[in-house]
Amino acid sequence: MSALKCATYCAGVLLYMNSSIRASGGSVEIDQARALAGAVTDGDTPGFPVRISQPGSYRLIGNLRVTPFSADTSAIEITSDDVTLDLSGFAILGPTVASGMPVTKCEPLGTGIGIDARRQTNITILNGTIRGMGLYGIWIGGGRVERVSISHSGRIGIIGSGFGGNAFIDNVVSRNGHDGISAHGYGGSRVTGNTVSSNGRVGIRAETPGANTVTGNTVTGNALIGILATGDGSAVVSENSVTGNHGHGILVSSVGGSLVRGNATTHNGGSGIVANGRAGSAVIANSVIANKKVGLLLGSSTGYINNVATDNSEGAVAGGVQIGLNLCGGLTCR
């Protein structure tokens, strides 16, 4: 082969290889074969975890099954800020299986994480499934997780830490060994529109020092508290449906004050709403029905108004300061 033909052939091979990795629009494509081959980004060795070490856009074009199929194997490790990973409807699969409703045990346990971006900020993860990881489904330092279904993690479905702030939106998080969603970084958290059920401890835990907003979620059948919002910042817990959790429906205890508004808490094993925030906290327009303990269990400085508390086993309201009309068992609260 002449030097000219060789150069032309090699250039064509390189162009083909590059096009096989990058989708139209510049996203880097990842599937099982690419994961096993390595070189997705600089420093990515063959096999799992796939290492994403450069900012940019990435997407799955097939399912990933961690190899070796072990609870200690992570699937994807992100070591750069400013990464978007679109799962594109595909799944990341590990070996862990949960038992019990809510979960009482996960086996095998391990250190495997579906997507590990614990030290990074401006991370976006979208549109797919993560199931059966030995430790966490997703661990993110700062960023957004949206429209991801996460189940059968040995410990936590989604955990947010670090300094970047987190938004968890429209995810389905169920049957994980400990918490469904746990946000405890320093930038505040927004947990919106998620369905969180049958996890082995708390459904949604928001404990960041910044402002926490937990709104529009459906939280059912978790082994302990449905929604727990605590920490040094403020908390807004609003418009959630919280049903059939084995402990309290909602527990809010934020140093910066809290607003609990427009939630429906029914048939929980503890109180419907527990609000122990500092002065300025308010519990407004909630429906609190058929919980196993007190409907509203409030701190001495917490104001409450326009709530309806009915058929709670240990009474409608304990504590708090009534600042307007509330209904207790169909009558005006006294």
Image (tube, helix red, strand yellow):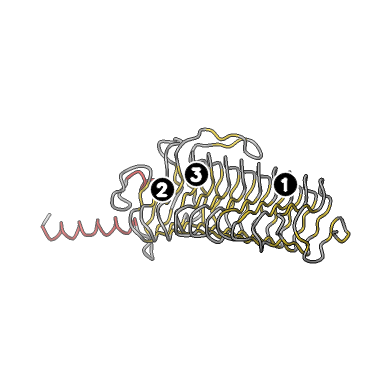
Do the numbered discs 2 and 1 sit on residues whose CB atoms are within 8 Å? no
Q: What x and y, as percent, mark residue 20?
A: 34, 56
Give the residue displayed 66% in from the left and 49% down from the top: 226
Q: Looking at the rendering, in which quadrant would you find the N terminus?
A: bottom left
Q: How crowded is the residue under tag 3: few (<14 C-alpha within 10 Å), some, or many (20+)?
A: many
As shown in the figure, which amino acid type bears the numbered disc 1?
A: Gly
Q: In this view, does 15 lie above or below 114?
A: below
Do the numbered discs 3 and 1 sit on residues whose CB atoms are within 8 Å? no
Cα gap from disc 3 to disc 1, whole angstroms: 24 Å
Q: How crowded is the residue under tag 2: few (<14 C-alpha within 10 Å), some, or many (20+)?
A: many
Q: What x and y, as percent, mark residue 285?
A: 75, 63
Is residue 314 found left or right of 126 in the rendered image? Answer: right
Q: What x and y, as percent, mark residue 151?
A: 56, 45
As shown in the figure, which amino acid type bears the numbered disc 2?
A: Ile
Please name which of the two marks, 2 or 1, marks the residue nearer to the observer: 1
Please name which of the two marks, 3 or 2, marks the residue nearer to the observer: 3
Q: Which of 195 and 291 is in front in this view?
A: 291
Q: Looking at the rendering, in which quadrant would you find the C terminus?
A: bottom right
Cα gap from disc 2 to disc 1, whole angstroms: 35 Å
Element at badge 2?
strand
> Which disc, if any, is residue 35?
none
Cα gap from disc 3 to disc 2, whole angstroms: 12 Å
Reading the image, the residue beneath label 2 is: 76
Is residue 79 found left or right of 175 in the rendered image? Answer: left
Give the mark nearer the N terminus: 3 vs 2.
2
Is residue 92 found left or right of 25 in the rendered image? Answer: right
Element at badge 3?
strand
Residue found at the very far right of the displayed protein: 331
Q: How crowded is the residue under tag 1: few (<14 C-alpha within 10 Å), some, or many (20+)?
A: many
Number of marks present in the image shown: 3
> Which disc, if any, is residue 136?
3
Reading the image, the residue beneath label 1 is: 244
